[in-house]
């Protein structure tokens, strides 16, 4: 299946659909993770009761608006791209924090807040001294994003629809993202998808393979473990080969080993950007996607897309939190000077 010819020039660069989450970050040690039976470096979904218990036990924490797709948009906006976000918050304090933060970046966010007893989502992130982040996510209101909340005109107006794999897990957002894919492809737009995490792949592998096999994904982001999980093989190159002919732009990050992109069957590789000190790996993949997409939108070479992705990822892992702090535009201009 191929997208229709574009019906008009896009007025936004990227519209993303993802979890509207506030991140709660705290420094931790391995003993704390063991005490709470947490898998180091992974992400698990937790219920409201565990969210309260874990939050109460966490060391002093810092609250920052997050969510994988929203983090990517933050990077894109910092690189001068026009963006819109679709995600569900509650009409509560954290919902107000999230809404303010995303709009303050210049990102369009018009999804109506829900009311009731389901609070805004939060992700409790424990960062160990080796900079590994262990994420414990209470999806809250974000998992109730209905298809009716979609702004289909905004989706059709964007050059790229960017979808967060994490949000494929709950039923309502999954239906909403399917409707969004139909709207984007009907308008001749590109669809980008990030696999997010192995647990999501394990639960929805058949869906993801179906999207790929039916040509509904134009740009696929993953890390090394995720693409191998999707292909159900232990060899990275074999995993890439499984999908290279089915996805026009296939991108996979490999932490300190850099990243690989296969575009129209041609393989490109790039090293990781140097980092003086890795503080917190939260958001590394999100910001890599932001840098890659920004260069892609600008029509730059695949090598440049990989380089800007690596540079954006390096910036975000050099400090706490999953949003850029340094001027990514300056980093881009220095990189391409």
Image (tube, rainbow, N blue to C red):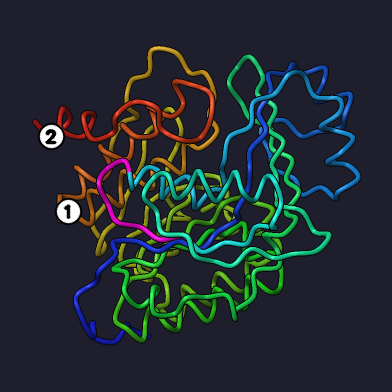
| Disc 1 element | loop
Residue 267: give x, y in percent of width and height: 26, 51
**Residue 220 occupies which quadrant of the picture?**
bottom left
**Residue 216 occupies which quadrant of the picture?**
bottom left
Q: Is residue 267 left or right of residue 39?
A: left
- Give the quarter of the figure containing the C terminus: top left
The residue located at (21%, 49%) in the rendering is 302
The residue located at (44%, 50%) in the rendering is 103
Local packing at callout 2 (Cα closer than 10 Å; few below 14, some 14-19, many 20+) is few
Residue 95: give x, y in percent of width and height: 65, 50
Magenta residues, as a range? 78-85
Q: Is residue 158 left or right of residue 58?
A: left
**Residue 155 occupies which quadrant of the picture?**
bottom left
**Residue situated in front as seen by the camera: 145 or 89:** 89
| Disc 2 element | loop
The residue located at (36%, 40%) in the rendering is 259
Q: Is residue 77 left or right of residue 64?
A: left
User: Circle 2 sits on which residue?
Assistant: 336
Please report whichever mark, 2 or 1, sits nearer to the chain's N-terminal start: 1
Residue 69: give x, y in percent of width and height: 49, 53
Q: CA distance from mark 2 to mark 1?
A: 12 Å
The residue located at (25%, 37%) in the rendering is 307
User: Circle 1 sits on which residue?
Assistant: 298
Residue 289: give x, y in percent of width and height: 38, 47
Number of numbered labels in the structure image: 2
């Amino acid at each position: 299946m191929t997208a229709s010819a574009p019906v008009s020039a896009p007025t936004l660069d990227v519209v993303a659909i993802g979890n509207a989450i506030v991140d709660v970050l705290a420094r931790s040690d391995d003993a704390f993770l063991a005490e709470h039976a947490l898998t180091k470096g992974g992400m698990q979904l937790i219920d409201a009761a565990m969210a309260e218990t874990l939050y109460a036990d966490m060391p002093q924490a810092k609250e920052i608006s997050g969510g994988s797709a929203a983090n990517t948009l933050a990077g894109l906006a910092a690189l001068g791209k026009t963006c819109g976000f679709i995600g569900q918050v509650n009409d509560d304090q954290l919902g107000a924090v999230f809404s303010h933060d995303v709009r303050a970046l210049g990102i369009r966010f018009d999804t109506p807040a829900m009311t009731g007893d389901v609070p805004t989502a939060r992700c409790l992130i424990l960062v160990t001294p080796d900079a590994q982040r262990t994420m414990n996510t209470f999806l809250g209101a974000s998992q109730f994003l209905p298809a009716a909340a979609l702004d289909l005109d905004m989706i059709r107006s964007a050059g790229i629809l960017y979808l967060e794999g994490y949000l494929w897990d709950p039923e309502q957002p999954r239906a909403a993202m399917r409707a969004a894919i139909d709207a984007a492809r009907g308008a001749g737009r590109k669809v980008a998808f990030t696999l997010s995490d192995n647990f999501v792949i394990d639960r929805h592998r058949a869906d993801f393979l179906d999207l790929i096999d039916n040509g509904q994904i134009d740009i696929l982001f993953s890390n090394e473990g995720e693409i191998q999980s999707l292909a159900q093989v232990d060899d990275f190159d074999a995993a890439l080969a499984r999908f290279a002919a089915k996805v026009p732009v296939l991108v996979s990050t490999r932490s300190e080993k850099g990243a690989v992109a296969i575009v129209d069957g041609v393989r490109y590789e790039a090293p990781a950007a140097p980092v003086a000190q890795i503080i917190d790996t939260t958001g590394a993949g999100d910001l890599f996607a932001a840098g890659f997409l920004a260069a892609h939108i600008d029509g730059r070479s695949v090598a440049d897309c990989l380089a800007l992705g690596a540079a954006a990822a390096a910036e975000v892992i050099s400090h706490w939190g999953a949003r850029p702090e340094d001027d990514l535009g300056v980093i881009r201009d220095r990189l391409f000077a």
